[in-house]
Image: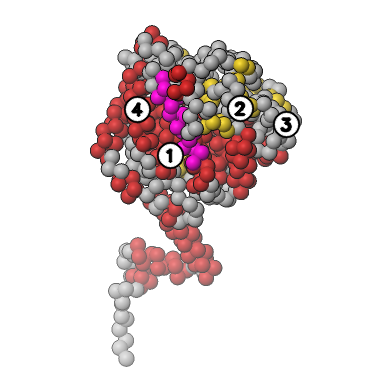
Amino acid sequence: MSSKITIGSDSSDDQLLLGAQPTWKSRLRTRWRLMDRCTRVLFVLLFVIIAAAILTRVLVEVLDPADYWPGPRITIPTERDKENDTAHSDKERREVIKAAMKHAWDGYHQYAFGADELQPVTNKSNNKWGGWGVTLVDALDTLYIMGLHKEFNQGVTHVTAVDFSKATSGFKTPFFEMVIRSLAGLLTAYEMSLDRRLLAKAQEVGDALMPAFDTSSGIPYPRVDVNTGKAVSADRVCLAEAGTVQLEYWKLSELTGNPKYHDAAQRVVDLLDKAEKPYPGLYPIWIDTKSAKLVSGKITLGGQGDSWYEYMLKQYIFSRHSNDQYRRMYEESMDAMKEKMVQRSIYDPNMYYVGDLDSSAKKFSPMYQHLTCFVPGMLALGSKVLDRPDDLELAKSLAYTCYRMYNATATGLSPEYVLFRDSHDKGLSQSFSDGMDEFAITKVSGASDKEKQDGFYLGSNKGYILRPETLESIMILYRVTGDPMYKEWGWEIFKSIDKWTRTASAFSAYKDVTSTKGSSQWTDSMESFFLAETLKYLYLLFSPVDYYSLDEYVFNTEAHPFKLLQTPNL
């Protein structure tokens, strides 16, 4: 046997003895050998967990949710979308709508940047929402969706410097409006860009508005003084204000990992679920903030009630069908609506509408609000998610009425509402205006030829404030049915908006849709939802159906698209 010492080139221990510099591989091997068995098991387990988390995230980002979680598809297959052979015209129309968005943004940027709103006729600005720059925040995700990244970055640079714990001195911030516009706008801008400054600002907004929940019942107050950090006491709050903040606070909980936001908002749902109602599934609009009782007010899927019903379905979709409470409440409400609130024009058998009920659910008002025109889209979504095919047929009939509210006027713009008469010539007075008793049904004068042709007549409020609800339903119905008719309806409406409301700097609300006097009808107002909703829905109508797919996103009531919940049990 040789007495010489053999030095193996692969022995890290020998290398160390001889003073050689160890490689990183040899260091790892040495450390691994020095670990006890338990430490090695824990290390392997940690590696597996991290690898699984990364793989899950890749699947979530890359694959369609329908590929990895059960549930009916909402959107038509992309092949069917392509079969409509509208790709060329769709691209052209999309670019025109994008140019309209840029026109509105450029006007805002030039004359009102950082303010809440541009006044698009006088080119002045206002801070009617407390100075948070609401138009800017509300428009961020629309800019991103349309590929206007320079403009998006302009907005982000500004918004990251805004102190959302402060507002105009003395201003009482409306809880619901700022949740659906500002909180939601920042959350979706973050999910799109992954700029963590936006998530920090979203949490700042969410925290600034949380004092609204500081009531004895958990039903939120309608306003918050963010400067003092306290809610403004009120005896009552309307249904939509209390019941349309749940998606936003749930998303904030998901992204921050803090359940307190979702818990506070969910408590409202639980309370209203248990509240006594005049008819199962129907909710009067006024809620007592102390007792959480439904105390008074009409029953409506229009203003002050609308988005509460919408959010029952959308929370079910957002949760990936994991909470049956939302499904049960939504179906109960839709069954009641169909039984008690849907009527048909006596002049057009294809024209259906959703009216209002009084607080007892016994008196009916034959008025169809533009705000209620979100219902066709909601029903279309629900028809697929919950396998309710009859709801889709009703959605089509209601959407037809909403379209005719535009198509029947001299400008092609829709008024705030239309009115219907019954077979006994009873209805609301033609002089009916906001603030009047909408259940004061009376004998109305004989129907004109135009009413017989249109199927409805107008009240005194003939204004169009750039509302999005009809276009929302049209976009959803196209993506659900694949019927190209909806694209033509949407394009027709856009052309009317562009023709009659475009100003030198942006777009203005229009005073009387029956007047063709043009600029004399401009009201010098452009709500932030025109950029956040109206133009976004139009752009998505002419985009491929898998672009911000209804199977991957749920849109809040201000058209901000949230990715579906990644952890359904949150």
Point 38% across, 43% down: residue:
482
**Nearest to N terminus: mark 1 or mark 4:** 1
**Nearest to N terminus: mark 3 or mark 4:** 3
Q: How far across and how far down the image is residue 123, in percent?
A: 37, 12
Q: Amino acid at mark 2?
A: Asp
**Nearest to N terminus: mark 3 or mark 2:** 3
**Nearest to N terminus: mark 3 or mark 1:** 3
Quadrant containing the N terminus in the rendered view: bottom left
Disc 2 target residue: 356
Disc 4 target residue: 492
Q: Does the stretch in magenta take in 265?
A: no
> Over which residues does the magenta segment extend?
393-409
Disc 1 target residue: 477
- Residues 108 and 33: in front is 108
**Nearest to N terminus: mark 2 or mark 4:** 2
Q: Which tag is nearer the camera, tag 3 or tag 2?
A: 2
Q: How far across and how far down the image is residue 62, in percent?
A: 38, 51
Disc 3 target residue: 293
Can you see residue 530?
no
Q: Amino acid at mark 1?
A: Leu
Q: Disc 3 vs disc 2: Cβ atoms closer than 8 Å? A: no
Query: Which structural element holds mark 4?
Result: helix
Q: Which tag is nearer the camera, tag 3 or tag 4?
A: 4
**Nearest to N terminus: mark 1 or mark 2:** 2
